[in-house]
Amino acid sequence: MGGVSTAKLEPAVVAGRSCLRLTGLVGLENNGGFSQASLDVSNSEFLDAVGYDGIQIDIYGNGQAYNIHLRTGDTSHVWQSYRTSFLARPHWTILRLPFENFRPHRIDKPLDLRKLRRIGLVSIGAEAKVEVSISRLSLYIL
């Protein structure tokens, strides 16, 4: 894939909250273009998220757009995912990202919530300074 993007994920305290902080630079040179922190969401093969409405994150950013990418048992290639975008404001914000807003990327199958495997926080597609912190990530029910 190439690319010259950099990223670092580390524990931090941001505006009084313990969190994980992702920092770095996204560069587009050499066919690059993303920085990512991801989490495998199950100790077994998959997490069954049927019955939940989406993903909730407590986030503090730098005013830029970021993505959440979901991987499932159907995403067999690294470039496949289900994606939604959001703005990470420069203060702590609780965001709810409904599963219905996630769009397939380079895959023709619908999102199967019975086979959730990984959640990724991604800065992608544009040169950017990455500064985003998460104090909590969970599934939610309305």
Image (cartoon, rainbow, N blue to C red):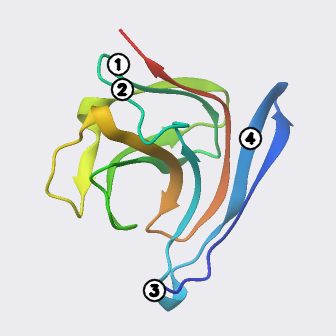
Distance from label 3 to label 4 (Cα)?
A: 28 Å
The quadrant in which residue 5 appears is bottom right
Vertical comparison of 135 with 25: above or below: above
Which one is closest to the eye, mark 3 or mark 1? 1
Residue linked to disc 2? 49
Distance from label 2 to label 1 (Cα)?
A: 6 Å
Q: Earlier in the sequence, mark 1 or mark 4?
A: 4
Residue linked to disc 1? 52
Q: Are marks 3 and 4 in contact (CB under 8 Å)?
A: no
Give percent across and percent down for residue 113.
29, 33
Residue linked to disc 4? 20
Q: Earlier in the sequence, mark 3 or mark 4?
A: 4
Q: Which mark is residue 31?
A: 3
* Residue at the image point whose x is 59% and y is 25% from the top: 93
Q: Earlier in the sequence, mark 3 or mark 1?
A: 3
Q: Residues within 10 Å of mark 3 (few under 14, many from 20)?
A: few
Q: Is residue 105 left or right of residue 117?
A: left
Q: Are marks 3 and 1 in contact (CB under 8 Å)?
A: no
**Residue type at mark 2?**
Ala
Q: Earlier in the sequence, mark 3 or mark 2?
A: 3
Which one is closest to the eye, mark 3 or mark 2? 2
Q: Which mark is residue 77?
A: none
Q: Residues within 10 Å of mark 2 (few under 14, many from 20)?
A: some
Q: Is residue 46 left or right of residue 9?
A: left
The quadrant in which residue 49 appears is top left
